[in-house]
Image (cartoon, rainbow, N blue to C red):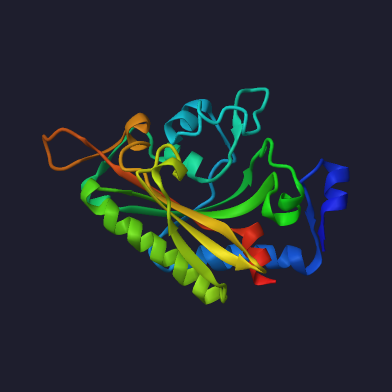
Amino acid sequence: MIDFERGAKATGSKFYFLTGDDAMQELELCMKMMKFHQERGYEPVIPPYLVNKKTCEAAGILPRFEGDFYETQDGFVLIPTAETPMVGFRANEIIPIEELPLKYVAFSPCFRREAGAAGKKDKGLKRVHQFHKIELFIICKPEDSERLHEEMTVQVEELLDELGVKHRRLLLDENERPPTAAKTYDIEVKAGKEWLEVSSISNTLDRQAKPAQIRYRPEAGKKPIKCHILNGSGVALPRLRLAMK
C-alpha cells in the first residue's frame, strides 16, 4: 500500500503514493499528534509551504545548505520543515512580555532534495523527497529557554510512549548540531534492528530571533530584547511508520 513504483512513474525516485489503510493511518497519526500537543498548550498552525529566501536565511538553512531544497521560478523555496516558515511567522515583531512563551504545533509536508543520499541503505521510507511532519516551535524569554527545551524533549518522548514505540535520546556534539542550534537532542526510534532519528529538538538561543527580529519589551520604556527560539519534530511520519510496523 506504500507504492514507490507508481510514485517513481508519476514523479521520480523516492516519491511514493499512500493508498488504502496506509493513507488513512497517515491522516489519523497527524491528527493524533496535533491534538496531543494542543492539549499541552501548543497552538495549532498550518503554515505556507513556500517561503522566501530572507526567511530561509533567518532560519539558518541558507546559504549553508544551498542546493539541498527545491526552488520555484519565482525564487520561493519549498519548505524542508515547518520550522522554516515558523521563523518568519512573528518576524519583525515586538511581542508583549505577557504573551510569552508562545507555543505552536505546525503540520506541513516537507520537501528535500536529499542530494547524494541515494543508495541501498536509504531504500524505502527512511529517506524520501516528500513527507509529513509535525513541528513544535516555541518563542520565549532567554531565561526560560533551557527549561522549555527539556520540557519539549520530554513531551516528544511521552508521545512516543503513548504510541507504543521504543525510543532513545541522544545529546548531539557541536559538530553534529544544526548551524543555529546551541543544544540539540535527537530522539531515535527502534525499527527492526535499526535506530532511526524521528525528532531533532534544538535550543537556538537568539540565533534565529536576531536575523528575524523577534523581540519582546521587558517593561514600558525599556529597550526590546531578542527572544529565544526552540524547535523540534513532534514527529516525522515516515520513520515513525517503520517503527510502528
- Residue 151, image x and y in percent? 34, 63
Residue at 48% from the left image edge and 44% from the top image edge: 83
User: Is 172 left or right of 143, judged from the image as shown?
Assistant: right
Residue nearer the viewer, 93 or 152: 152
Task: Specify the quadrant of the image occupied by residue 91.
Answer: top left
Q: Residue at x 82, y 41 (%)?
A: 11
Viewer-proximal residue, 110 or 118? 118
Q: Residue at x 69, y 44 (%)?
A: 129
Q: Is residue 136 something that shows in the picture?
A: no
- Percent coordinates x, y for residue 165 in the rendering: 57, 72
Visible residue check, residue 102 = yes
Q: Horizontally, is 74 left or right of 176 in the view?
A: right
What residue is at 37 percent from the left and 36 percent from the top?
Answer: 208
Relative to 197, say whether 74 is above or below: above
On the rendered structure, is 60 left or right of 16?
A: left
> Could you tell me which quadrant the N terminus lies in?
bottom right
- In-front residue for pair 110/241: 241
User: Farthest residue toward the left?
Assistant: 221
Number of on-image labels: 0
For the C terminus, the image quarter is: bottom right
What x and y, as percent, mark residue 156? 46, 64
For the residue pair 115 and 19, the one nearer the viewer reads as 115
Q: Quadrant of residue 215?
A: top left
Q: Position of residue 227 (x, y in %)?
A: 28, 42
